[in-house]
Every structure is written in structure tokens, then in C-alpha cells.
Image (spheres, rainbow, N blue to C red):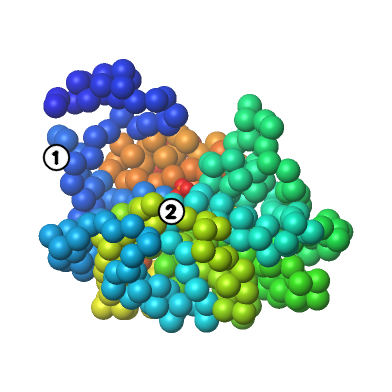
Amino acid sequence: MKKNEIFQTYEQCILNTYTRMPVIFVKGKGMMLEDLSGKKYLDFFPGWGVNSVGHCHPKVMAAVRDQIGKLIHIPNNLYHPAQAQCAREIIRTSFAGKVFFCNSGAEACEAAIKFARAYGQKKRFEIITMKNSFHGRTLGALTATGQTKYQDGFAPLPEGFKTVPFNDLQAVAEALTEKTIAVILELVQGEGGINIASKDYIQGLRKLCDEKDILLFFDEVQTGIGRTGEMYAFKHYNVRPDGMMLAKALGGGLPIGALVIQSGIADTFKPGMHASTFGGSPLVCKAALGVFKAIYSQKMLQNTKKMGKFILRELSLLKEKYAIIRDVRGLGLMIGVELSVPGQAIVQSCFEKGLLINCTHQNVLRLMPALNVTEKQAKKAIAILDKAFCELGGGAS
Ligand SMILES: *Cc1c(COP(=O)(O)O)cnc(C)c1O
């Protein structure tokens, strides 16, 4: 298919739910993407954080190639070694508990919502979530999402959700009722603009939830699997959740999601209460094992900490140079640059110069390079950003 035929076919045959950039990518390797015409791009936003170990990492490719010739799928009323190994690795790196496998972040959040309701035994069912959060697009996850722009037009939404301001412990305490069963939040809000939860807040939430026997869920769909420099962001807080949701980077590009539930309560779910046809298939579990191997073999957590600091420092220098940069913040390689103006023009300018970044919440540029990004690649990205700011008249401050 030629370029224009592809564009036309999308228009004719694919539901119009996305705003797409007019580019067709055909190859990826590490931090690089190549389009149909052979132009190369430095990818500082690999699939919303899906390709955290880089595109087509050799460890992921090897695992998938090995499995695909043996067995791709078996249903979940049977056993497979890869699912056992994958669950064990998630538990080993997080906390004592049990895993439910599904196919996406939204499904992991749905599983958490159902788990909370099951735990509430019909007496308690209210779930508290945060303003500017993001938990996915299915109806339950959408209702948990504290941004009305995603919900508009889809009423009636499921009952039993309350949204309170982020990083405000008092607001949670005031929203509690005798029907509250769970609190769900991201430790670093991704779509909401890279808002980092404070340590006091998270430790306070843990204490509050413990006192009232309320479940505390961390949605680590974006922060998990090394993104913040720890395997899971909760490790920065010295606090353990009752449940954790994973997806995005877990499968290295293959669709896998997971809900991890702490041991003491894991058996709330009994046979028949929840299910997924594809969840945790041999193929995706093998891919996830490949992702873990990739992270260990290249010491990516250390690199994420180091390069996260480096990029933040470089961006702070840009902040001194350009008045439109209001704030620079991040944890590991989950980095936001808040502007005083909409950020789409900067994203567009970077794109033309061969750098892929994202803009969320209108005015927050988001950078999430692969966890093995090098200093050279980071410098190149910063130089392109610098040029984009310069050209778009950011103005010296
Ligand atoms: C992306 C995301 C989701 C939804 O994941 P999907 O795989 O798109 O359903 C949920 N929670 C967070 C924090 C996310 O970043």
C-alpha cells in the first residue's frame, strides 16, 4: 500500500476515534522509529510508555519468537508455565500477593473495581478517585477517571464513585462514608500532567485506609515496570498498596494487563467471579518475561534514575532560557514540562525535526524515553527542544 492509499483506507475503514499525526511508521529499533520514506525519528514517547525497553528489544523478540512456534494461546481453565513464571516475577518484584491477568490498563482497573465491590460484600461499594486521574475508557474505568472531558456524552455512568483533589489527604478523609470500600490513584498522574504524589500524602492515605479497612489501589499502568527508576513507583513511598494495576510497559509491546492483590485478601475472588479469554496467554507472558530480562541485563533501573536526573537538569536550563516554560518536574523517566501556553505547536515542531514527544493536559509536554536511553540521545532531544522553543518565540526570560 502506498502512503495516500493507507490514509484513505483509514478514513474509509477505521472508526474516527483518534487524532493522528500524518506519518506511517514501519520499523523500530531501540529509541529509533523509521517511517515509510526512510526518515528516522528519536522516540521520546514510545507508545505512551508501552515500549519502555525500546522498540523490538532483542530479549523480547527472542522470548516471543521462541513461544510463537510452540503455543500461542490456551484458555485460562488450563495451565501454562509462562503464566506461572510471569506471575512469580511480578510478585517477587512487588509484594506478596496474587495476580489476575487481563489485556489492558482499563481492564486491570475494571478488575480492581470488581475486586473492591466483591470485598465490600454488598455493604460497601463507594470508590474514591482523584481529579485529573486517568484509568481508561471502559465504563467503570472511565467513571473512576477524574476528568469530565472523557465522560461527557456517555451518561449514565456506573454509580458509587467520588472524585476528590489530588495530593489532598483531608479531601479523602472528608469524602469517606460508611459505604467507602476503596481509594484508587496514580502515584504520578500521567495523562493528568505529570503530577507527583507527595510522600506525606501517600503515607497518610495508607494510614487512613488501614484505620477504616479501606482498600488502597495504586494504578501503576504508566508508572510501573521501571518508568520511575524503581520497578514500581510505590517503592519510592515506603508504602504498600492492597492492589496494583499494571499494563502498558509490562508486555514490551504485546497486550497484557495485570491486577496484583496483596496475599491477605487475594482469595476474595473465587472461581467464576472474574475472567478474561486472552488474559495472560503464553505469548504475552513470555514477552513480559523478556521485558524483565531486558531491564536486568542492561541495568535499566539505574539508568532511569541517572538519565532522569540528567534530563531534568538539562530541562531546568531551558526553563531559565525560555519564559513560556513554567515548571519542569518528573520522577525517573516520567518527565513533564509545563508551559504557560498550549504545547501542541512545540510537539509539532519537534516532530518535524525528528523527535517524538507528547503534550498532555493542553500545556504539559511529556517525555518518557526508553529506560535505556543514552546521554547522547538525551542531548540530541534537548537540542531539538531548544530549537523548537527558540523558533516558536519562547522568548528569553
Ligand atoms: C493508559 C492508562 C490506563 C489505560 O490503559 P489502556 O491499556 O489504554 O486501557 C489506565 N491507567 C493509567 C494510569 C494509564 O496511564
For mark 1, does the 10 Å Cα neighbourhood hold few (<14), some (14 to 19), or many (20 or more) residues?
few
Q: Nearer the viewer, residue 116 or 270?
A: 270
- Nearer to us of marks 1 and 2 is 2
For mark 2, does the 10 Å Cα neighbourhood hold few (<14), some (14 to 19), or many (20 or more) residues?
few
Residue at horizontal 29%, vertical 69%?
A: 80
Q: Is residue 9 above or below residue 96?
A: above
Q: Is residue 181 visible?
A: yes
Residue at horizontal 28%, vertical 63%?
A: 282
Q: Report if the CB atoms under discs 1 and 2 are less than 8 Å apart.
A: no
Residue that numbered label 1 is attached to? 38
What amino acid is at disc 1? Gly
Image quarter for residue 212?
bottom right
Q: Position of residue 215 (x, y in %)?
A: 69, 67
Quarter of the image where the N terminus is located: top left
Q: Position of residue 375 (x, y in %)?
A: 31, 67
Q: Nearer the viewer, residue 136 or 224?
A: 136
Residue that numbered label 2 is attached to? 276
Which mark, by number, is residue 348?
A: none
Rounded to the nearest whole Å, what is the CA distance between mark 1 and mark 2? 39 Å
What amino acid is at disc 2? Ser
Q: Earlier in the sequence, mark 1 or mark 2?
A: 1
Q: Is residue 138 above or below residue 18?
A: below
